[in-house]
Amino acid sequence: HDLTIQVAQHLQRIAELETSATELHNELERLQETIDSQHSDFENLVKESKKEIAKEKAISADLRKQLASKVMEKRDADQRCEVLQTKVVELEVILGKLSDYDSIKQNLQESKEALVVAQAVAKEKVEIAAEAEG
């Protein structure tokens, strides 16, 4: 009789353990599904992050190219500016020479006018002398 009770208790305990094991198994399956779902979400996040990183790298590379281009444009502009500054100096020298030329031209014109006056005076003196002799 005691043995029957003990066997019944063990059978009940086994049934409880089986129920517990089934519940634990079900809980493990739910946890596995959650893990799988979160893993999938994580993989998607990683993929999206890699895409974003690739986009940012492309943008960064493009910006570096644009910057390099602007640097080259600035160098070219600086060189053109240096050439123009040199030409300005050359033109200032030429203008100085032209100013000197204008001054020389003015002096020549004044000398020419003085010569014409001197010739007129000389001609007049020759005429007066000729009249005096004549």
Image: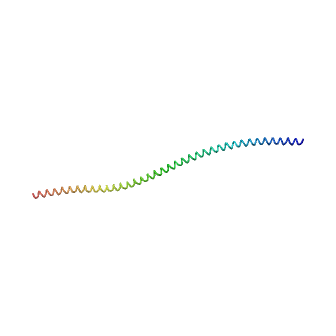
Is residue 96 or residue 36 the one in the foreground?
36
x%, y% of residue 11?
83, 41
Q: Is residue 13 above or below residue 107?
A: above
Is residue 88 or residue 27 the one in the foreground?
27
Task: Looking at this view, name the residue that lies furthest to the right.
Answer: 1
| Image quarter (top left, top right, bottom left or bottom right) of the N terminus | top right
Task: Looking at this view, name the residue that lies furthest to the left.
Answer: 134
Q: Is residue 3 above or below residue 109?
A: above
x%, y% of residue 14?
81, 42
The image quarter in which residue 91 lies: bottom left
Left or right for 27, reference 134? right
Is residue 85 or residue 12 the one in the foreground?
12
x%, y% of residue 94?
33, 55
The image quarter in which residue 125 lies: bottom left
Total of numbered circles in the picture? 0
Left or right for 43, reference 68? right
x%, y% of residue 97?
32, 56
